[in-house]
Amino acid sequence: MSIRAVVAVFILAGLCLSPADQIRLKESGTLSGKILTEKADRVFIDVGYTVLDVPRKSILEITKGDAPKASKNKAKAVKKGIYYTGGGRREDGSVRELVTELGASVVQVKSPGGIGSGFFINQDGDLITNFHVIEGESRITVEVYHMRDGRLERKSYPDVKIVALNKFADLALLRIEKAAREKFESVPLGDVKELKVGERVFAIGSPLGLERTVTQGIISTKTRLMTGSLYLQTTAQINPGNSGGPLFNLRGEVVGVTNMKITSGEGLGFAIPVEKVKYFLDYSDAFAYDNDNPSNGYRYLAPPSRGKAVKNAEAKRKKSAKPSAK
């Protein structure tokens, strides 16, 4: 049975179940039910009377029923793979209000090599940070600040898995393991195309280990060329420890990932545009981390030195030219 026919049957069935998740199809139809499993090439959804196997190529977008709940002042969140978009406020809010709303989604990332920041992209424990925050590390701990009874409570999660790495984009995808019963506060990803030069933004992170630090400023430029890549430049103060943390617009959407500053000046901070983050997440399988593969996640091994190679070749040539003993 084709996807179009299945949609028709589902509609005729009277939509007797209470829909939670929705799959919008390219064939102008929508399936409502409970998504059971999502794979790289297909999605399995329980529509009440049966479980459907929907090819990814037939899906236009997925809206999860467990997406971050939107108030009247918030746009509807749309699920794109493992992250959400479009879940920010319809109107700009104040930094004070937004910090209260978004604070629990920002985390501190710790390793033996140092401290950085990060943020959750869904409720299941997937989070973004910088590659350089965890480079060369395998023992990673995430400090989460849960909102309980109107107060933030710190909880440490030591079982953190490296899911994907992209050294050249300075991005890393982590996942908190053994936290099936936990639901984490997440934030939606915004759109750099809608961002304007001069627009107010703010960052939350752990500069110099001072967790829950908020700094605000404006977007100085959207296309600053640094080290061969384009970055958002901002006057929001960025310091060591902010790396991997979110740069928010006043709608409460992530527009960048803070990762560096010019130390010889003030108000010269930089963030990776959120479009690069989306690309990294959309193709995270290509950057998948595997402990058994030393070149995974685009972490290439250094090539042998030319001098050593020439020396070895010369030694082999001399050995082959030496006359055999009689």
Image: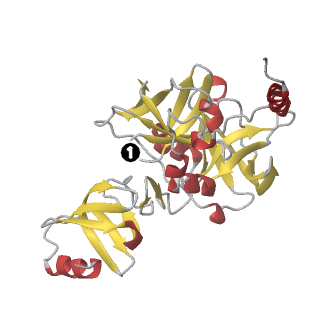
Q: Amino acid at mark 1?
A: Gln
Q: Can you say which quadrant of the picture contains the C terminus?
A: top right
Q: Residue at x 56, y 31 (%)?
A: 212
- Give how far across and how far down residue 284 sits, in percent: 51, 50
- Give how far across and how far down residue 120 sits, in percent: 47, 42
Seen in the image, is 143 located left or right of residue 232?
Answer: left
Judge by depth and name the residue closer to the eye, 194 or 90: 194
Residue 41, quarter of picture = bottom left
Q: Residue at x 14, y 77 (%)?
A: 14
Residue 125, quarter of picture = top left
Q: Residue at x 33, y 33 (%)?
A: 179
- Give how far across and how far down residue 238 sits, in percent: 71, 37
Which residue position holds label 1?
123
Q: How many marks?
A: 1
Q: Residue at x 43, y 57 (%)?
A: 81
158 up-or-down from 47: above or below: above
Q: Secondary structure at mark 1?
A: loop
